[in-house]
Image (cartoon, rainbow, N blue to C red):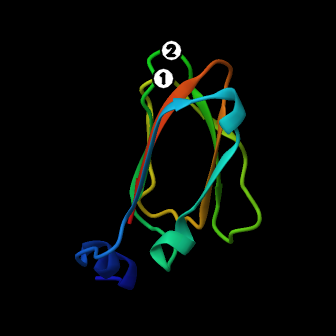
Amino acid sequence: MSTYEEDLLKPKDRYFAFVDASFQVGDTPATHDVETSLNKKSIDGFIKCTDTVTGIDIEISSDGTNFGDIFTLDPEESLNLVGLEVSKIRVSRKAADSAYKIFVS
């Protein structure tokens, strides 16, 4: 078993959870500093667009400074973060108000 697999199987003593049920115009973009919250980079979790009408744009940083390409989560769509090294997550609205959940460990 690899070190990565062993780490995924260990019980998690820390997690970061965030819910924004009314992600509004003035809130965008919202940057969540996962590495600071966990005292480590996340390698497990998910992001879910919980809105039924409007999607959200997501950017992920593995080093805390540089973000990758923007990608869209459509309404009620989720992204599995297992195996991704996540330092920060930036969320932007697509158009009207939206909603989302983040859970990482």
As drawn, the label of residue 89 is none
Mark 1 vs 2: CB contact within 8 A: yes
Q: Residue 43 is drawn in which quadrant?
A: bottom left
How packed is label 1: few (under 14 Cα within 10 Å), some, or many (20 or more)?
Answer: some
> In the picture shown, does residue 66 fall above or below 69?
below
Disc 1 or 2, which lies upstream in sequence? 2
Residue 64: x percent and y percent? 69, 69
As drawn, the label of residue 75 is 1
From the viewer's perspective, is 69 left or right of 76? right
Instruction: Identify the residue shown where x is 35% and y is 83%.
Output: 2
Q: Amino acid at mark 1?
A: Pro
Along the viewing direction, whichever of 45 and 22 lies nearer the viewer: 22
Residue 20: x percent and y percent? 48, 38
Q: Residue 83 is drawn in which quadrant?
A: bottom left
> In the picture shown, does residue 46 fall above or below 56?
below
Instruction: Identify the residue shown where x is 77% and y is 63%.
Output: 66
CA–CA distance between discs 1 and 2? 6 Å
Instruction: Identify the residue shown where x is 50% and y is 70%.
Output: 37
Quadrant of the drawing holding the C terminus = bottom left
As drawn, the label of residue 53 is 2
Tell me the element at label 1.
Answer: loop
